[in-house]
Image (cartoon, helix red, strand yellow):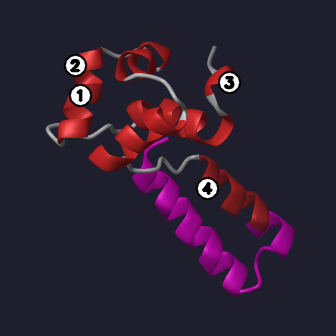
Amino acid sequence: MSSRILEEMHGTAEVLFAGGFIDKRRMDEHEALFQAHQVPQYTAESVKDLWQRLNISQSVLAAIINTRSATVRAWEAGCKKPGGPSCKLPDLLDRKGVETLL
């Protein structure tokens, strides 16, 4: 689902909740769905911090997330920004650790 659609659904749920048309439990379900699909934005600095914190090299990070080392270098240099699916795996690594994807 595109983020625009999710944002619209989330906004509609908030209006329905504020108007008393859905209860707190249902609103919490909508909120959890919305949050689960949010992809964090990684900057050049946060990519570098990630592999250093995990104590792995750029090449190992690239292999774990199934991309090229040159792509990771481009992220760090600020030439490219990871987006969409490219942010999901680094986010998973960030939250759960390397063991999750090995």
Residue 12's x, y, as percent? 57, 70
Q: Secondary structure at mark 1?
A: helix
Residue at mark 1 to residue at mark 2: CA–CA distance: 5 Å
When asked about the image quadrant of residue 78, the answer is: top left
Residue 41 x, y percent position in the rendering: 39, 50
Report if the CB atoms under discs 1 and 2 are less than 8 Å apart.
yes
* Mark 4 lies on residue: 35
Label 3 SS: helix
Q: Amino acid at mark 2?
A: Ala
- Magenta stretch: give its range: 1-27
> Toward which corner of the image does residue 75 lie, by quadrant?
top left
Question: Left or right: where does residue 42 sit relative to residue 40?
Answer: left
**Does residue 50 appear to the left or right of 81 in the view shown?**
right
Judged by depth in the image, the label closer to the viewer, 1 or 4, is 1
Which is nearer the eye, 90 or 10? 90
The number of numbered badges drawn on the structure is: 4
Disc 4 residue type (three-letter): Gln
Q: Main secondary structure of the magenta part?
A: helix
- Tag 1: residue type? Arg
Give the x, y percent position of residue 10: 57, 64
Q: Which residue is mark 2?
A: 70
Q: Earlier in the sequence, mark 2 or mark 4?
A: 4
Describe the element under mark 4 as helix, strand or loop.
helix
What is the distance, in whole Å, between disc 2 and disc 4 at their CAs? 31 Å
- Vertically, is 78 above or below 51? below
| C-alpha separation, residue under disc 2 versus residue under disc 3 | 23 Å
Residue 73: give its label.
1
Give the residue type at disc 3: Thr
Q: Residue at x 32, y 37 (%)?
A: 82
